[in-house]
Image (spheres, rainbow, N blue to C red):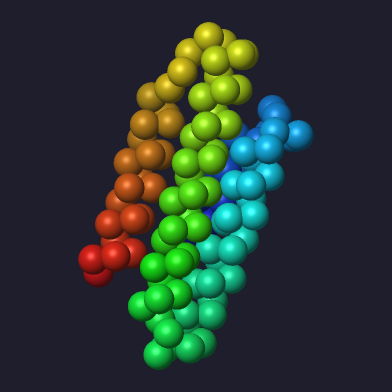
Amino acid sequence: MEDFISNYSFRNCSNAIGDIWCILSAIFVGLSAIIGFLSAIFSKLSAILVFLSAIFAILSAILSFLSAIFRDTIMDKTIIRDEDLKEWFLVALYFYMSFYH
């Protein structure tokens, strides 16, 4: 699922390379992946690390969404596209699965 979030983040960066939200989103995706890896190694800290990983993934998704809103508003005068809503459903599903399963 982290691959989905990183692909989503970088797809939104493709038209706004210098956009600060894209840069922060990429950083949060990286932190989420590192923390997820550490949680696999240290099982005693797993619950805390999974929680932190989910928080970074959520921050990444929010920043990516802000980037998409501002990019789309400027480029084609739309705020949210149907494909963004489908991807947000998957991000919400990832959040649910991280905490409850």
Q: Quadrant of residue 86?
A: top left
Q: Position of residue 95 (x, y in %)?
A: 34, 55
Q: Residue furthest left?
A: 100
Q: Quadrant of the C terminus?
A: bottom left
Q: Position of residue 41 (x, y in %)?
A: 51, 87
Q: Is 58 placed above or below 13 here?
A: below
For residue 40, side relative to residue 91 (left or right)? right
Query: What residue do we see at 49% from left, 35% from top?
Result: 65
Whether residue 27 appears in this view of the structure is yes
Whether residue 4 appears in this view of the structure is no
Query: What residue do we see at 59% from left, 71% from top?
Result: 34
Q: Is 76 placed above or below 99 here?
A: above
Q: Residue furthest right?
A: 18
Q: Is 68 placed above or below 28 here?
A: above
Q: Quadrant of residue 49?
A: bottom left
Q: Is 2 placed above or below 20 here?
A: below
Query: What residue do we see at 57% from left, 56% from top?
Result: 29
